[in-house]
Amino acid sequence: MMYRVALLLAAATASASPLVPREAPTTVLPTGPEATSESKSVYNWAEGWETKYPIHESCNATKHAALEFALDETVQLAQHAREHLLRFGDKSDLVKKYFGNSSTAIPIGWFDRVVAADKSAMTFRCDDPDENCATQDGWAGHWRGDNATQETVICDLSFSVRKNLFDVCAHGFTVANSALNTYWAVDLLHRVLHVPAISEDLVHHYAEDYNDALRMAKEEPELTGYDSDILQMFAIDAWAYDIAVPGVGCTGTQEETEEEEEETSTATTTSASATATADEADDGDAGEMRHLRLAQPLQRASRSMTVNTISPTSRVAVSHSASPASHIQAASFHTDHAQQKHERRDEHKPNVQAQEGEDHYVLTLWTDKTHHQTMTALRRQWFPEKLLKVNAHITLFHALPGAKLQQVKDDVAILAGHASPFDVVASGMGAYPMGKGVGVNISKPAQAKANHLRAELREKWSPFLSEQDRREKWKGHYTILNKEDDKERVGRCMDEVRRDFAESRGVVEGLILWRYDRGWWRQVKSFPFRNGQS
């Protein structure tokens, strides 16, 4: 009896006591036995995993803070790109636009690596160990390549010109037409995709521009997930549409390349000789004009376009004499020449207060005679005869103002004095659509060297360049066909050039300055590369 009473009293006491909240369960990772000299340390799979991008001590406090913020934005950009792919897959118009029918797993994987791959071996530095920031005008940074494959240098220029993600779609930016490296996040996404720790040496540059990226998604979707520019375009396009301006974005539409020298006259030509042109021979600065009348029939490029020689009786051969006159067109004027009127679009006009009728000048690469003849024969095979006014060419600048002619000559002469000749290759594999035409890109090593020369001049001339010439993006190419309204003929040209034009190899020997004359070009002066020459 007493035992029952004791139990009841104990129960009553317990029921009257306040309840103690239950503690949340705590997960404790097993630590194992304490390490001794005789015992091995416990395996920790995550040890040493560094997901933040390391910044070198050469970056002072200000640069360190700016670069750290920019790298964090790069991670945000990549993370959103990955999440857009995971959320929508191939149901997203953006995904289909950039990656076609290829697997989304590939770009997801690259963006995931940008976000979470181990970065302990990488370094972003602010000094200039290779002296590229100091010696290469316009360089804002570079991957160190063979000098240090995991290191990236950020030059001072980056800290003054790059914008942040909160500025996306502002100031007229469009994905299609603006430089991708306008924003820190996109620029650094490009840079980290060079580093093997992120790209595993599998991400490269294939697309030349926005339109080429769209073409690749349709024709070569298997490459899109491995293309650095397409990954960048998709990331910023998805950010713009989803985050910056929801549901609208700022994609834009890239205008097809149209070259100023092939402008159509507003007057009606009445003579077949309009297909020819007059040019000035390079006789120092005198620019003595020669008028040559062509009597030989047009020699078409052969069906098997691997031949690098032209018949000596062809129109192409007649128009080529000793270098640098190999770029001079044979010519005869038609009777309406003086009455024609040509109008430049605003983006093709130099940024100067020009007098009415002031001359404009064009700067091109100067290649060896055989290569030039081969490319000219291909161009003459396809280009609309009534519009054919100049031979094959690779244009660096389309509209240099006459008011700055002496500066242009002086700057080009200095540049050519320390430049060296370099190889160039053009092949059917580099053919691409141009709306109403077809272009052929030059080889990537030649692109890089030519673009370096152009960047040096663009930096000096930026205040007076046209909008077209001021663009950082540049693609060295030959225009094989342009202004062709017959879509079927454009398609046939594209197919045949890709299939039959194996390649033409040559050497870039210098630069040539031309005076633009209502669609015709007149040679003013040639500038041979003299580095290494006596």
Image: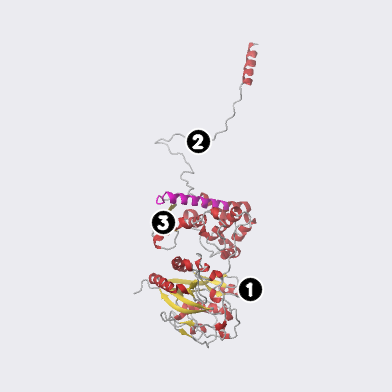
Residue type, mark 1 in image: Lys
Q: Which residue is mark 2?
A: 30
Q: Is residue 65 magenta?
A: yes
Magenta range is 57-80
Report the residue at 62% width, 59% height from top. 96
Q: Quadrant of residue 1?
A: top right
Q: Is residue 485 above or below residue 177?
A: below
Q: Position of residue 145 (x, y in %)?
A: 43, 59
Q: Position of residue 503 (x, y in %)?
A: 50, 73
Mark nearest the camera among 2 and 1 is 1
Cβ–Cβ under 8 Å for marks 3 and 1: no
Dot placed on the residue nearer the N-terminal end, 3 or 1: 3
How is the structure coloured here?
Answer: secondary structure
Depth check: give the residue in front, 508 or 149: 508
Q: Position of residue 103 (x, y in %)?
A: 60, 57
Q: Which residue is mark 3?
A: 148
Mark nearest the camera among 3 and 1 is 1
Q: Is residue 375 visible?
A: yes
Q: Is residue 121 visible?
A: no
